[in-house]
Amino acid sequence: MLPNIIILLTCLFVKSVVCVGCYWNADCKYKYFSSKTPYEFVRGDIRDTFVKQKGCDPLSVWIITRHGKRNPGVKYARHIEDILQYKDNIISSFEIGNSSLCAQDIDNLRNSKIDKSFLGEPIQIVSEGYQELLRLGSRLKEALPELLNGLQAENYLFRPAYGRRMYDSARAFIEGLNYDKLNITDGDDDYSIVAPHATCGAYKSEVVQNQSTYHEVLEYLNSKDFIDMKNRVEQRIGLNFTLTDNQITALYDLCRYQFDGIRDKPSPWCSIFSTADLEVFEYLGDLNHYYRNSYGASKYAKELGQISLADLYRNFLEARNGTGKRIVSYFTHATLLDMILVVLNLYKDTNPLTGAHRDWNRKWRSTFLTSFAGNFIAVLNRCTTDPGNTLDFNIAFYLNEKPLLELCNGGVCSWQEFEDIFKPFLNATTDICMFKSELVD
């Protein structure tokens, strides 16, 4: 009789532990998915964080922002389509007792539906992505009402990089500013400011298309860290085969792309992963960005990122002299935002990221730097100082609507500091590119 009681108590205890570990009722769901993180999870609020200075008025704002949340690309959509065929197998595995997922999580997975456009319209912006840019524009208008009211053609510039999702992001941002007839400037195949990397031949061949760029990524894919994560997921869902890297990545993509940040509505597919599993994938994303776009490719990142920042300097110099625009806004890719951070020597780790060791305290976290709709904002202020009503100028910087504290004095640079940092960028060119490559969206 005693052994039976022990078995019963053990089963009750195990059931209790499983319930505590259920995804559907977890108090703190992990929401950090590298560059595919919804903006809502990492943003500040420019209305609250805007640096108000006595005697100062905003004169011009320059913003470069990543496009809003989009669908996965063609290759990844194919992998997702493949893994979706195993949805019923995952459910059946639970029903026969081979899975450690919770009943409600399985119900949510069973009832989940994938919109046709998710796989049928690769890399196009989704409704959440449109809202990310619309709301960003709305908050900026509320933070700078006098500057952004009554815009005329001569005092604004909205320019997207190549691709429909860029144009749609620009349109959403303008709608958020509460305008419906402002012009969007076409790139005319010249994206040297808004996406200098896009046609940089040497960068494409030496970095993007060079397999050695991804050495640390491949090392991490073969690390104990990553293999243990795969084993945990396989055990959790109880399928009778080993998942390939493409298959487990497709499951991860179903989790992160289907997680609605604005409505804070998790994807049922996230129940497959623990927080520890998601942290592994997040680091994999960091490695990709680090070696393709940032400090691991600093030869190109430093030069190409300077081109965009030189435009910032020119615009603010014109605004200071009374001939500039009230707002200049560019819509681009995570690649360029990464490069801009490298130019400014921000979030640089003492030691490079590696596939052999995951640094828990790393500064380079793509989640918080270049999420969907991630942005870099600079505001030029004109100040009157007493005595004598002397004019002065300073520039406040923000990353994702949070003060960029690492620059100058808590994110605010005097004009002299600004000039010392940014004026040298006027010498930047695309000569490093050697040749112009084909523009591919």
Image (spheres, helix red, strand yellow):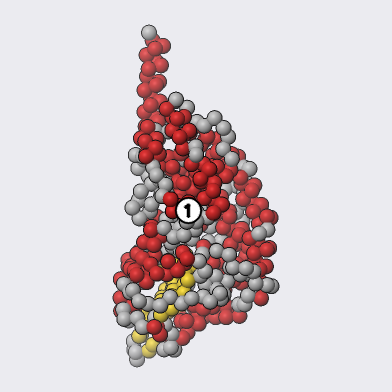
Q: Residue 108: image x %, image y %?
A: 37, 39
Q: Residue 256: image x %, image y %?
A: 45, 49
Label 1's element? helix
Of residue 116 and residue 51, the one placed in the foreground of this image is 116
| Residue in the image at 56% along x and 58% along y | 289
Picture quarter with the C terminus:
bottom right
Q: Identify the amino acid type marked 1.
A: Gly
| Residue in the image at 49% along x and 58% along y | 123
Residue 274 in view (yes/no): no
Q: Residue 403: image x %, image y %?
A: 41, 67
Of residue 118 and residue 176, the one placed in the foreground of this image is 118
Against 82, residue 261 (above or below) is below
| Residue in the image at 42% along x and 69% along y | 170
Quadrant in which residue 200 is drawn? bottom right
> Which residue of the protein is positioned furthest toward the top in this rendering?
1
Q: Which residue in the structure is indicated by mark 1? A: 120
Against 440, residue 187 (above or below) is below
Quadrant in which residue 421 is drawn? bottom right
Sort mark 1 into few (<14), some (14-19) or many (20+) by Cα contacts within 10 Å. some
